[in-house]
Image: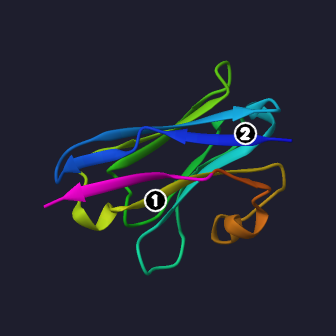
Amino acid sequence: QVQLVESGGGLVQAGGSLRLSCAVSGHTSSNYAMGWFRQAPGKEREFVAVITWAGAKTYYADSVKGRFTISRDDAKNTVYLQMNSLKPEDTAVYSCAATQKSFSVARFRDAVDYWGKGTLVTVSS
């Protein structure tokens, strides 16, 4: 059974940076496309970013493009989300996701096999 455990969340001022990590256990992360989602209070979960197998391609939500960077280190079975120029509207619980299925970016959520429990990011103004 694959487990995903996020870390790195916390409180940061607007304009600041955080790096989230997602540790993969129970399987080799290189077998999975990995992504991040977020859910703000009272809102639906939304796609943030995805990185394909071997990091060949990355895709981002328009709201984070140019500010967030997803990367992976399969030797460490870990995926990262570097978040720069954070805004109060980035406040949310950020969850890691993994899939072995083929997917389109628009339908990545439907392809997810495994979810992490999430880590809270709070951006103060």
Rendered residue at 67%/42% (across/down): 4
Looking at the picture, how far across and down is residue 116, in whole percent? Answer: 64, 50
Q: Indicate the secondary structure of the residue bearing disc 1.
A: strand
Picture quadrant where residue 28 is located = top right
Rendered residue at 17%/54% (across/down): 14
| Mark 1 lies on residue | 93
Q: Is residue 119 above or below residue 31?
A: below
Looking at the picture, how far across and down is residue 114, in whole percent? Answer: 75, 53
The residue segment tinted magenta is: 117-125
Q: Is residue 89 above or below residue 9?
A: below
Inter-mark Cα distance, 2 to 1: 25 Å
Looking at the picture, how far across and down is residue 42, in whole percent? Answer: 43, 81
* Residue sitting nearer the eye, 65 or 112: 112
Label ID, residue 72: none
| Mark 2 lies on residue | 53
* Residue sitting nearer the eye, 56 or 18: 18
Picture quadrant where residue 27 is located = top right
User: Around disc 2, counting alpha carbons within 10 Å, would you say few (fewer than 14), some (14 to 19), or many (20 or more)?
Assistant: some
Identify the main secondary structure in magenta: strand
Amino acid found under the numbered disc labelled 1: Val
Amino acid found under the numbered disc labelled 2: Trp
Q: Nearer the viewer, mark 2 or mark 1?
A: 1
* Residue sitting nearer the eye, 29 or 40: 40
Q: Tags 2 and 1 in contact by the CB under 8 Å rule?
A: no
Rendered residue at 56%/54% (across/down): 95
Asked if residue 12 lies in the magenta stretch, the reply is no
**The N terminus, quarter of image:** top right
Q: Residue furthest left?
A: 125
Rendered residue at 82%/57% (across/down): 102
User: Around disc 1, counting alpha carbons within 10 Å, would you say few (fewer than 14), some (14 to 19), or many (20 or more)?
Assistant: some
Q: Indicate the secondary structure of the residue bearing disc 2.
A: helix
**The C terminus, quarter of image:** bottom left
